[in-house]
Amino acid sequence: MAIRRYDPWRLLNELSTEIGRLYETAPAGEADESSLATSDWAPAVDIVEESDRYLIHADVPGVKPNDIDVHMEGGVLTIRGQRSSEAKEASQGYKRVERAQGTFYRRFSLPDSADAERISARVDHGVLEVVIPKQERVQPRRIKVEG
């Protein structure tokens, strides 16, 4: 049994964080309640827009690359995976267990400029990097009007 310090505001802070993530990642007008129901934890994420691509960095320490699934469907990028839990017994000397175990799930609506065919992902030192290139812009063409 893990010993935890009592924090009266912990549950309220967790609820606030989950509600914020719900509205942050849901497509306009659609609440994504499935991520709250299907995940045990959610990795912290940074999203950067550069001139030619979008970058998503997600903290997934202890998660093997084979345990991460990244897929794109209908303009929504989904990242899900699992951090395996090890049996932690009091006899092993654990005084506190704070690192989340189990499944994680995050969804992101992508803009129309994202090139879904060239999305790539890799893990390096516990950080998942998803590269989403932007589509090459079609140059406007001037059309001569004859009369």
Image (spheres, grey):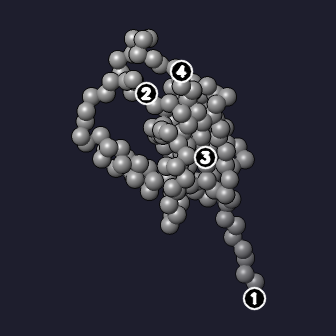
Q: Which one is earlier in the sequence, the residue at label 2 or at label 4?
A: 4
Residue at figure coordinates x 25%, y 36% from the top left: 7
Q: Secondary structure at mark 4?
A: loop
Q: Measured along the vertical axis of the image, is residue 125 above or below residue 116? A: above
Q: Which residue is mark 4?
A: 86
Of discs 4 and 1, which sits in the foreground?
4
**Residue 95 visible in image:** yes
Marks 1,3: beta carbons within 8 A: no
Distance (Cα) linking label 2 and label 1: 73 Å
Pointer 4: residues within 10 angstroms few (<14), some, or many (20+)? few
Of discs 2 and 1, which sits in the foreground?
2
Distance (Cα) linking label 1 and label 3: 52 Å
Distance (Cα) linking label 2 and label 4: 11 Å
Residue at figure coordinates x 45%, y 38% from the top left: 44
Pointer 2: residues within 10 angstroms few (<14), some, or many (20+)? few
Q: Secondary structure at mark 3?
A: strand
Q: Which residue is mark 1?
A: 147
Residue 3 screen position, x and y as percent:
33, 24
Amino acid type, residue under disc 4 in the picture: Glu
Of discs 2 and 4, which sits in the foreground?
4
Judged from this view, the residue extending furthest toward the bottom is 147
Q: Which residue is mark 3?
A: 78
Q: Secondary structure at mark 2?
A: loop
**Residue 127 visible in image:** no
Residue 82 screen position, x and y as percent:
58, 33
Q: Secondary structure at mark 1?
A: loop
